[in-house]
Image: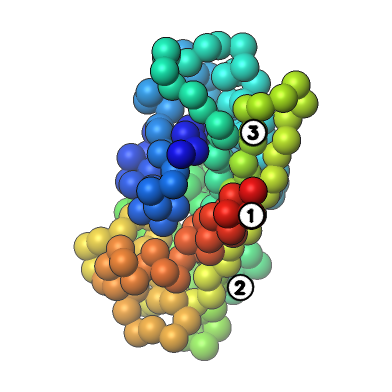
């Protein structure tokens, strides 16, 4: 059993990660630890942000013993977002704070605000040019050893942006994103289908394969 600390307090994300990784992994949130500092995600790439979160949390763990009986083998940190071709790859690393870019760059916006801004910016863009992709980079940092061992894994899901939200499931940009080969949004397809298609599921599949080879 691999005990992983996921560098997030987003319970929905942890449930999704646990479902994809399966029973050989036990995923814990930052809420299981006390005094964990926030990591400023100020890198200009998904890789940079994921590695920074994994490295800083790993260093904190090595200096601060977790609760008794909680043996953590790895820190898992991810950074992911939406890349829209008509917007030259935006919102990209700013996906979570897209609507707040004109103000506090470190403050996340609500999903509703981000989706509304995206639709406004694409209002005049015809359907064939609304191509986009979700990209996820996962950084795995081992807690064993004196030097940090960090490996990265990437997953991409191609698709397009619809003209209006569809579905009540998922989170973030899911109601607007239609994955390639489908005519429904991630929010409409359901967790089981999404977990077989998503950018995060592809990156996590690479993680599972890597651990299976150990």
- Kindly identify which residue carries mark 3: 142
**Callout 2 crowding tier (Cα within 10 Å): few <14, some 14–19, many ≥20:** some
Q: How many marks?
A: 3
Residue 135 showing in the rendered view: no
Residue visible at 44% across and 71% down in the picture: 197
Q: Is residue 194 positioned above or below 209 on the image?
A: below
2 or 3: tag closer to the N-terminus: 2
- Kindly identify which residue carries mark 1: 213
Q: CA distance from mark 1 to mark 2?
A: 36 Å
Q: Which is in the foreground here, disc 1 or disc 2?
A: 1
3 or 1: tag closer to the N-terminus: 3
Q: Give the image's coloring scheme.
A: rainbow
Residue 177 showing in the rendered view: yes
User: Which element type, helix, strand or loop, lies under badge 2?
Assistant: helix
Disc assigned to residue 182: none
Q: Is residue 168 positioned above or below 65 on the image?
A: below
Q: Which is in the foreground here, disc 3 or disc 1?
A: 1
Q: CA distance from mark 3 to mark 1?
A: 16 Å
């Amino acid at each position: 059993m691999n005990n992983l600390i996921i560098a997030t307090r987003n319970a929905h994300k942890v449930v999704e990660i646990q479902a994809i990784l399966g029973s050989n992994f036990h995923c814990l949130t930052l809420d299981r630890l006390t005094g964990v500092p926030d990591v400023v995600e100020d890198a200009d790439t998904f890789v940079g942000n994921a590695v920074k979160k994994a490295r800083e949390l790993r260093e904190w763990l090595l200096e601060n013993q977790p609760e008794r009986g909680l043996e953590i083998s790895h820190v898992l940190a991810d950074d992911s977002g939406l890349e829209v071709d008509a917007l030259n790859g935006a919102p990209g690393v700013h996906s979570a704070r897209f609507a707040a870019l004109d103000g506090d760059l470190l403050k996340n916006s609500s999903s509703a605000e981000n989706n509304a801004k995206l639709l406004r910016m694409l209002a005049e863009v015809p359907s064939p040019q609304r191509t986009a992709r979700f990209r996820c980079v996962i950084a795995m940092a081992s807690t064993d050893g004196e030097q940090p061992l960090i490996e990265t894994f990437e997953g991409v899901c191609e698709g397009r942006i619809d003209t209006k939200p569809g579905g009540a499931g998922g989170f973030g940009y899911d109601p607007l994103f239609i994955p390639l080969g489908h005519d429904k949004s991630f929010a409409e397809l359901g967790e089981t289908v999404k977990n077989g298609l998503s950018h995060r599921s592809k990156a996590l599949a690479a993680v599972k394969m890597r651990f299976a080879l150990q």
